[in-house]
Image: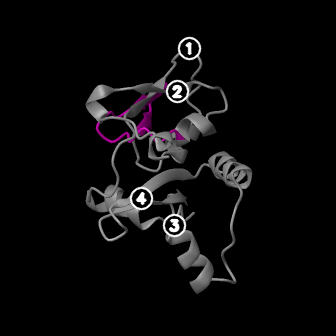
Amino acid sequence: MAIGQPFADFMLEHHPQSSRLLTQAEALDLLRAEHERGHLHSAWFKDAMLNRFYAICNCCKCCCGGIKAMVKYGAPMMASSGYVAQVDETLCVACDTCKDACPFRAIQVDGTAVVKWEACMGCGVCVGQCPNKAMSLVRDEKKGVPFDVRLLA
């Protein structure tokens, strides 16, 4: 999802068959649907893109180059959200859903889910996929400052 100008106009001009403008409500609906599918939302910045936020990706772990580069090669493609996943052991039934959903392989299951702090990016995919609501995100200052898109307005 290209965000703002001149990025949205560029996409519309160069990819008219596969791009369109979205209202804020449509964009939020799209993000909710991607979350329900277990996809990871990530905000992208590049020096070459006016040194600012320009896109939101809604990636699945099977085909995202950034996720693959991090998990397979340890390349630092993404920054942590500033949160870390936490397991409520009283609700966890060790079903492996969170482990299977985690794009960063940060969860192991051995009687209950266990989060590997160093691998967890705080993306929240596990939270959205846990059928028993045993996963949550908690603020962790050691993981950095959370990105608040509202501050860009």
Q: Is residue 60 visible?
A: no
State how far apart marks 4 and 3 are (Cα).
15 Å
Circle 3: is it few (<14), some (14-19), or many (20+) Cα within 10 Å?
Answer: few
Q: Which residues are magenta?
A: 107-124
Q: As displayed, is residue 49 above or below residue 112?
A: below
Q: Earlier in the sequence, mark 1 or mark 4?
A: 4
Q: Nearer the viewer, mark 4 or mark 3?
A: 3
Circle 4: is it few (<14), some (14-19), or many (20+) Cα within 10 Å?
Answer: some
The residue labelled by disc 3 is 5
Q: Main secondary structure of the magenta part?
A: loop
Relative horizontal placement of residue 36, taking residue 56 as reference (left or right): right
Q: Nearer the viewer, mark 4 or mark 2?
A: 4
The secondary structure type at the circle numbered 3 is: loop
Relative horizontal placement of residue 109, taking residue 32 as reference (left or right): left
Q: Earlier in the sequence, mark 4 or mark 2?
A: 4
Q: Earlier in the sequence, mark 2 or mark 3?
A: 3
Foreground: 122 or 108?
A: 122
Foreground: 112 or 119?
A: 119
The type of residue carrying mark 1 is Thr
Residue at the (35%, 66%) spot, across then down: 50
State how far apart marks 4 and 2 are (Cα).
24 Å
The residue labelled by disc 4 is 44
The residue labelled by disc 2 is 136
The type of residue carrying mark 2 is Ser
The secondary structure type at the circle numbered 1 is: loop
State how far apart marks 2 and 1 are (Cα).
13 Å
The secondary structure type at the circle numbered 2 is: strand
Q: Position of residue 128 (x, y in %)?
A: 61, 38
Residue at the (55%, 29%) spot, across then down: 94
State how far apart marks 2 and 3 are (Cα).
35 Å
Circle 1: is it few (<14), some (14-19), or many (20+) Cα within 10 Å?
Answer: few
